[in-house]
Image (cartoon, rainbow, N blue to C red):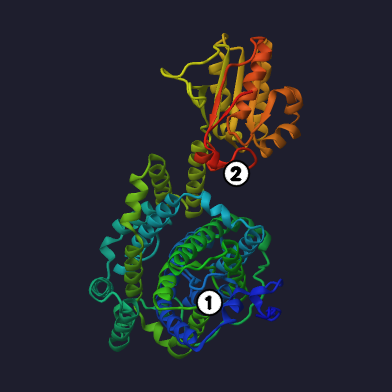
Amino acid sequence: MANHKVDNSTDPLHSSRFVLPIFRSLYHYSPAALRADLFAGATVALVSIPQTIGFALIIGISPQVVIYAAIVGVFFTALFSSSRHLVTGPTTTISIILASTVLVLEPTGYDPLQIVVTLAFLIGLIQIGAGLIKVGVLNRFISRSVIIGYTTGVCLLIAAGQLNNLLGLRREEGPDLFSILQNLVVRAGEINPWTAGIGVASLALLFVMGRWLPRWPGGLLALIIFGGISAWFDLGRQAVITVGDIGEVLPSLPTFQGAPFPHDMFSLIPLLMSPAFAIAILGMLETVSLSKAVATSSGQKINPNQEILGLGVGNIMSSLFGAIPGSASFARTASNFQSGARTQCAAVFSSLFVAAIVLIFGPWANHIPVATLAALLIFICSRMINPEQIAIAVKSTRSDAAVFFVTFLSALFLSLDTAIYIGIAASLVLFLKKAASPQLVEYAFNERGDLSEVGDSVKRHNNQISIIHVEGELFFGAAEIFQDQIRYIAQDEGIRVFILRLKNARHVDATSIVSLQQLLEFLNKSKRHLLISGINDDVERVLRNSGFLAKIGKENVFRTELNPTMSTKRALLRASHLLQTGEADIRIFYDRSKTGEKGTGPKASEGPVDYQI
């Protein structure tokens, strides 16, 4: 059969040049995929419209600015995203951080629109930088308990904060839960019965539909029904606040505004850096976590750094078109996946459908009662709180429970950017605490020649020699514990030679080298000896580069070999020489067929082999 050389020069999948991920998906695009993406895009758009208007209510800005983010941000993020199903845009968590930032800075004279658009630009820059330097893998070091605790706290804050809109009360509360509840108690006598009636009826409708008709677009139907009632009966005469009262929705498309550099940018930007980093970090965590979760179901392999880069591009473009920043949306991504989306084109189509709906039906949205939007947000938040995940976080381990409650309470009673920092810090501290616990166990050779832990059945062959097996992390966080444990063992002055077996020690760094050096000096003062066995290439390189190898002497350090205990055997012979006790009477029984190790020496088929030096 003749060999045919395949020409991949026109295939973007085999091109060495950078190609937008969406073009890779389009290379084998089909009419069936187009139909699936169009349907999924339309479904996502119907979910997006009521949510975006509700997020404007949270932030306290015109719905138009939030809708533009669902058009521009979603469009450009989809072009750069490696996930075929991820949909970004305005989200509840991002909206409430924006709201708390606006609430703090607006009294100082800054325009809310200027604040959120500048934040979008800063967040985009941070995320693009993070994507380029490939920090996507760092999300694995952030405990899931942080996200669960933060999301739960934010959802409760949003739900509590919307009670005033649900009941027709003035918005004069602070960003924390205590201020919100205090405002409700103080103003309880000012409840508008018309507004409260619409709000409670909307909430009841949403929960009934969510329970009995879960596949129906309950949020959209609630807005249509109560928007129609408001327009028909002119409820504005009953002091019922509508969307048009907080910011008119116009039948217009976003236009290019340019970089959001205000005249007082040098005084504003420093005030925005903390919330910008908090939103950027949270957005990256949400995006990578959600895209991975969907990829698990779809079987797709994603690139976390590409997702972060795409999110950053989307936020930069949102700011250039005068829109708010966004993040990964659980509800819209789930709708996209469940609706059968095939490629990133579904997210692109959703942004185009949102634009078309705004052009055709935009003015009608001005009649929607704010109380109905408040009910919708409360309903969304109730669905986002996951009791099963909370139970896992609280019951799994004490450290997970601690991280959850610290993050949860910080979100309720502190600023939200501070809460995310506290949660991440708590997660990292507990991670380092777990990692910084190396195990040190004294070993000796048993009658069969195997290394076993010293105990009742296994004794030292020579009481002047101690073999200490070190397993675990030896980075800076573990160095002090490592040194203390070694010194405790070294208090026995009858032991003249210590053999540190470092075969399973990981991440030796400068701090652990200093600890080894101090141990060496401590033993040398009492004319005792330190030997090291079982080191690999990485550990040897650190020992050599730091100068410790020259200090301890090459003759006292033994590399790992095919036989995992041979280096310790050689160290024992060296110890015997130092003590002038003659040859160590040790036989090492090594069964290669059990370990499955490869290399030179006896074949596995030859069975167990006795080594003796």
Residue at (68, 11) in percent of width and height: 525
Q: Quadrant of the C terminus?
A: top right
Q: Quadrant of the N terminus?
A: bottom right
Res. 250 visible in picture: no
Residue 539 located left or right of residue 198: right
Amino acid type for the residue under numbered disc 2:
Lys
Residue at the image position 50 percent from the left and 36 percent from the top: 433
573 horizontally vs 209: left or right: right
Q: Residue at 31% of width from left, 69% of height from top?
A: 166
Residue 240's quadrant in the figure? bottom left
- Tell me the element at label 1: loop
Name the mark on residue 162. none
Q: What amino acid type should be assigned to the residue bearing mark 1?
A: Gln
Image check: 139 left or right of 172? right
Q: Position of residue 169 (x, y in %)?
A: 33, 66
The answer to which of 151 and 234 lies nearer the viewer is 151
Q: Is residue 349 above or below residue 305?
A: below
Count of labels in the image: 2
Q: Name the residue tied to disc 1.
A: 344
For the point 32% across and 50% down, which residue is it?
A: 391
Residue 396 position in % (x across, y down): 36, 45
Q: Residues within 10 Å of mark 2 (few under 14, many from 20)?
A: few
Q: Nearer the viewer, residue 177 or 128?
A: 128
Element assignment for label 2: loop
Q: Which residue is mark 2?
A: 598
Above/below status of 40 relative to 479: below
Mark positioned earlier in the residue sequence (2 or 1): 1
Q: Does the rendering let one see residue 155?
A: yes
Residue 99 x, y percent position in the rendering: 47, 63
Q: CA distance from mark 2 to mark 1?
A: 45 Å
The mark closer to the camera, 2 or 1, is 2
